[in-house]
Image: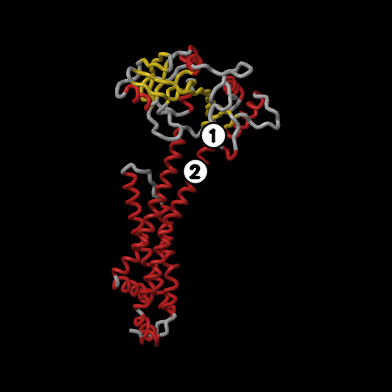
Amino acid sequence: MKRWLDPLATVWIGITTHKLRSFLTMLGIVIGVASVITLMSIGKGSQAQILSRIQTLGSDRITIRPGALTFGGVRGAVGGASTLTLEDAEAIAEQVSYISAVAPTNRGNLQAVAGSKNTNTSVIGTTPEYIQITNLELASGTFISESDYQSGAKVAVLGSGVKEDLFGEADAVGQRMRLGTNIVYVIGVLESKGAGFDSPDDTILIPLTAMQQMVAQSRTSQGEHVVSSIELTVSDEKQADYVVEEITSLLRTRHRLSPNANDDFNIRSMQEISEAMQETTATMTILLGAIAAISLLVGGIGVMNIMLVSVLERTREIGIRKALGAKERDIWIQFLLEAASLTFTGGIIGVVVGWVVSYIVSSLGLMTTVVTVDIVILAVVVSAGVGLFFGFYPAWNASRLDPIQALRSE
């Protein structure tokens, strides 16, 4: 046992004898590892936040919008093509299986006025199923009812941002407001979703039938009512691909598209968007980690430099050890362990510093951070690897010293 502990004892003596040098050697590794932990935790946090936002919109949700997909899957502006209709939505609800709810929507921008306050905001005309499909929750009041939809009642449900702009802290439910040139009654206020992907906070929801009365609505050549999009949910997420195929076939038939013609609509599921976002944010996290790893590389070069200096300073010590019977392997292991110990210790301290910085950043609300076990393990393993890699040459150089020449050195 003593034979195995001797190299470690020698390493400890070497490190503690030159405290300042050991501290400066570890400092570069500490900064490098802390940078990796902090930046990768920011990347992971951003990924978790984005995916959480998408999940709140409903993982079983599918959105159909007009217009063909352009290069790279990027869609042109909504409303650039008038190819979706209210009748399409009704046909989908009646003819496609595994669909639990369908809500056609029509979007526009209108001036909303309440007392002396006004705002220009997005108005969505839709059906009672919309709240179920989009997983929206009410802070107060009620949502659009079937009777509101059937009668074209001029009622409105406000996003939390619009409510604050028009009514402040006052209760908006039951209040009148002007929307465009029409007077509407507020029947509900939505819970805040916060700024983010497809946030409803700055929108006003009204019955689609009321929207058709308040704003001039386009019609197709067959007299069907044009809509901006069709939202729906599937009853079984495993059947999402089947539902997309069935909807595609149905709409191509309804729109009389030839076999060689491109779709004049595009279909996107939240699952597909979630996967795309995961790939994008994972790439961003790797990029942030790679940038931070540069500081680890610099720290590794510092380790090599310090270890080479250490070999020069301890040349006589190496000569004495060789004269007393130490083999080249013993000298090599001693200096390699010393380098690895410094970087490993620096890695542990760097993990703690990185975690503390990440916690502070998250606590202050600057960014969402997530420190995961894989990030910690990666940082510690890489820091130890840096010590072994950059400590190899100094250790090998020390082991090759001629004992006679080493004993002659001052």
Vertical placement of 297 versus 75: above or below? below
Please report the residue visible at 43 percent of the width from the left and 68 percent of the height from the top: 390
The C terminus lies in quadrant: bottom left
Q: Which class describes the residues within 10 Å of circle 1: few (<14), some (14-19), or many (20+)?
A: many
Q: Residue furthest top?
A: 151
Disc 2 marks a residue whose amino acid type is: Gln
Residue under numbered circle 1: 269
Of callouts 2 and 1, which one flags the residue occurring earlier in the amino acid sequence?
1
Disc 1 is placed on an element classified as strand
Vertical placement of 228 versus 2: above or below? above
Q: Which class describes the residues within 10 Å of circle 2: few (<14), some (14-19), or many (20+)?
A: some
Residue under numbered circle 2: 278
**199 left or right of 225 in image:** left
Q: Which mark is residue 145?
A: none
Q: Quadrant of residue 347?
A: bottom left
Toward the viewer: 91 or 117? 117
Disc 1 marks a residue whose amino acid type is: Ser
